[in-house]
Image (spheres, grey):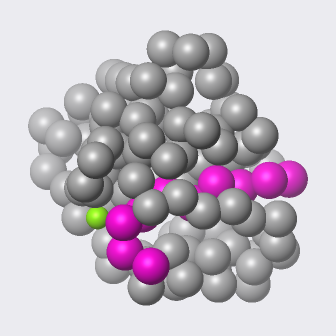
Amino acid sequence: MKVLVVDDSSTMRRIIINTLKAAGYSDVDEAGDGQEALGKVDAAELVLTDWNMPVMDGLTFVKEARGKGFDKPIIMVTTEGAKNEVLEALKNGVNDYIVKPFTKPVMVEKINKVLGL
Ligand SMILES: [Mg+2]
């Protein structure tokens, strides 16, 4: 299953990808902003995206991806833990969210949940 990891921080991408690999998800692609991610999203079966990014932020990316018919699960990985932001993300097509800093069990639990496992 191909997973797309979107974050402007290469360090954070590495942390997320290492967590995914430890959980058995080894087919991972990555993007540094929402615009780059839009060009890769069609091949993905699961997306983990940051919110705050240059060029195109995560919320805009989610809206654009949903707008062009992408219907696979999207998890927002963000420092924006405030209720209003979370509700806005969910309203715009995010399936679930993870607040940074996160633990591996939390990330695995959210992935299993959105995949219906
Ligand atoms: Mg960021």
Identified at 71% across, 55% down, the residue is 3
Left or right for 52, reference 48: left
Which image quarter: residue 19? Answer: bottom right
Where residue 17 appears, x then y in whole percent? 63, 76
Asked whether residue 112 is drawn in magenta, I would say: no
Identified at 80% across, 53% down, the residue is 2
Left or right for 27, reference 75: right
How many marks the image carries: the answer is 0
Q: Is residue 5 above or below residue 92?
A: below
Q: Nearer the viewer, residue 116 or 65?
A: 65
Q: Is residue 42 above or below residue 100?
A: above
Q: Is residue 90 visible?
A: yes
Q: Nearer the viewer, residue 32 or 46?
A: 32
Left or right for 85, reference 60: left
Q: Is residue 57 above or below residue 72?
A: below
Identified at 73% across, 43% down, the residue is 44
Which stretch appears magenta? 1-10
Where residue 18 appears, x then y in whole percent? 65, 84
Find ligand 1 in the image and state its quadrant: bottom left
Q: Is residue 98 visible?
A: no
Where residue 37 appears, x then y in whole percent? 53, 46
Where residue 6 appears, x then y in whole percent? 49, 57
Which image quarter: residue 63? Answer: top left
Which image quarter: residue 92? Answer: top left
